[in-house]
Amino acid sequence: MVGSLRAAALLACVVLCALLLLLISGVQQFGAQLYADDEEVLLRQLKERRRERNDPSGGESRLLVDSSGSTEAHLDEMGCEALVGMQALEVLGSGYTKLVFKASLSGGQSVALKLVNEQGIDMKKCLEEFRDPEGCRELISYKLEKEMILLRKLQHPNVIKLKGHCAGVQGGRGVEAGRLAIILERGDPLQMIQLLQSPWEDRFRVCLDLVRLLHFLSRSPLGSIGLLDFQPQQFVTVSGELKLTDLDDGSAEETPCQTDADCTLQFPQRNFSVACSAQGSCERLNEKRNIYNAYRYFFTYLLPHQAPPRLTHLVDHIMNSTGELKADVNQTLEAFEHILHLYESGLHLDDIPASILRDYTVMRGMGTSGAVEYRCWPSYSQQGCLLSVHGAKEAAHICNSHSQCNSFTLTGQKTWTGRLLASFKSNFSHLVPDETSEVYVKKSPSS
Ligand SMILES: Nc1ncnc2c1ncn2[C@@H]1O[C@H](COP(=O)(O)OP(=O)(O)O)[C@@H](O)[C@H]1O
Ligand SMILES: *[C@@H]1O[C@H](CO)[C@@H](O)[C@H](O)[C@H]1NC(C)=O
Ligand SMILES: *[C@@H]1O[C@H](CO)[C@@H](O)[C@H](O)[C@H]1NC(C)=O
Ligand SMILES: *[C@@H]1O[C@H](CO)[C@@H](O)[C@H](O)[C@H]1NC(C)=O
Ligand SMILES: *[C@@H]1O[C@H](CO)[C@@H](O)[C@H](O)[C@H]1NC(C)=O
Ligand SMILES: [Mg+2]
């Protein structure tokens, strides 16, 4: 009891401290001098932003105007009232522009709150240049507002879900004016290091989700969208599913051009050239940039290593066609879905004979206890050797290839593809009744 009170007090303090910091930083800047020239530039930028927001024609602004012409809340979205009584703010992540908190709403739902990062690089740069905290806050809030509107228009399983927003105090021009918070489905920031150590199946899922996202973005309601800041930090996972969360610097414009020479894609390792269309824009440059970025930030790290032996030629083909930009996003998606189909259906295992199971005695409705475990990599469990299999045949094939393996148990647990988790063991002391599993024991054990 005392412990939980203390924890609550601590959390309250964390929340307060965070808010105080934000407020203080805002107030401190009020004293700053304004420089006339800078002020003009800032005012011009602000005017442009305001015009973009209000004028439906031309440029990026068409992104921001709903069919109804408004940027107001939609009826089914949460508003400020949803945040009343929320608890347990903790920072989930931050970037140049935005700060993201985890919050538990009074109904028990856990969400992410995204705000302008008052300590971020964007704000610092703006303040250095213009010394106008209110103007800078408005300018940067605009990015958050743009993101909110994009999230409404680009709904997809691999884009984070917007649940609503709270615009703070309306109308004022002061500390509160720009305090927009958008309410998002909560995810887990993508941890590349952790992902590198996960089973291939989970890494493949992230890449497949990414390609599904890029396929959608290439033909989105707003045109073909290029992600200009394409890094793992811009994504989170929700129950293992990849979702894009940072949308503020997507571009829906294809680069204008006069000749092919105006259409080059430059990366540190590779340059590509793209054709300039008769309409004077670089043909599908956004799609191509996205594919190559997927290759260099995701596929190279996640896809080839530990791929199932019978699928490596297909994986290698994807690596080559995306790394050379030989395949468009449709072809890339097809190649990924084909791998998924083989992997789920077990068709790639056709050449393993069913007779392989003759070497094993099967006991259905049984599990084991007192097991002598051994470790393998990459296992779903730290202690033993737990791998996904299509069925008993593939498990027997794996067991035969591990010198320590004398038995395996097909558990009732499934991975995201519907494959079964199988636990491989050296030996065990007892069989125990277990409705959900089957034990296979080698008839002639290896030593
Ligand atoms: N819905 C979310 N759930 C969990 N973490 C999130 C969520 N959205 C963003 N984050 C984390 O917050 C960080 C900053 O958010 P982001 O939108 O990328 O801001 P910025 O535009 O400043 O880069 C992200 O890198 C990510 O780790
Ligand atoms: C890409 O093009 C730039 C500009 O033309 C050039 O400086 C750079 O060396 C090229 N990089 C590669 C890897 O070819
Ligand atoms: C693609 O394959 C070709 C031919 O084998 C090879 O020269 C090239 O380096 C490969 N490219 C990538 C990005 O893997
Ligand atoms: C990609 O696939 C979509 C259907 O999913 C189709 O409408 C579109 O024309 C295809 N694009 C190319 C370049 O083949
Ligand atoms: C497995 O364990 C049993 C009982 O614990 C033991 O009698 C047997 O010799 C072991 N078999 C192997 C192959 O280690
Ligand atoms: Mg970001």
Image (cartoon, rainbow, N blue to C red):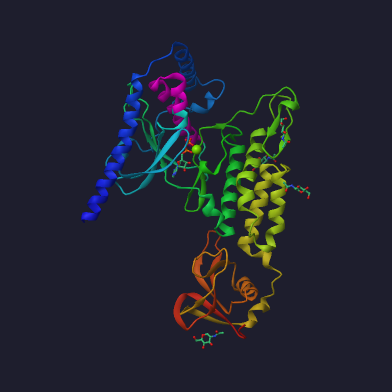
- Residue 48, given in percent of the width and then of the height, sits at 49, 18
Give the percent coordinates (x, y) of residue 178: 37, 26
Residue drawn where x is 28% and y is 38% of the image: 16
Number of residue marks:
0
Picture quadrant of residue 447 = bottom right
- Quarter the N terminus occupies: bottom left
Q: Position of residue 358 (x, y in %)?
A: 64, 82
The answer to whether 350 is drawn above or below residue 139 in the figure is below
Locate residue 271: give its quadrant.
top right
Q: Is residue 321 magenta?
A: no
Residue 441 figure quarter: bottom right
Where does the magenta region start and end?
Answer: 124-153
- Report x, y in % for residue 167: 36, 30
Whether residue 100 is visible: yes
* Residue displayed at 47% across by 15% down: 38
Q: Is residue 137 magenta?
A: yes
Q: Main secondary structure of the magenta part?
A: helix
Considering every residue shown, the one lying at the far left of the view is 2
Q: Nearer the viewer, residue 362 or 268?
A: 268
* Relative height, residue 83 to residue 349 (above, below): above
When the figure is inspected, residue 384 is found, relative to residue 145, above or below; the finding is below
Left or right: 229 in relation to 68 = right
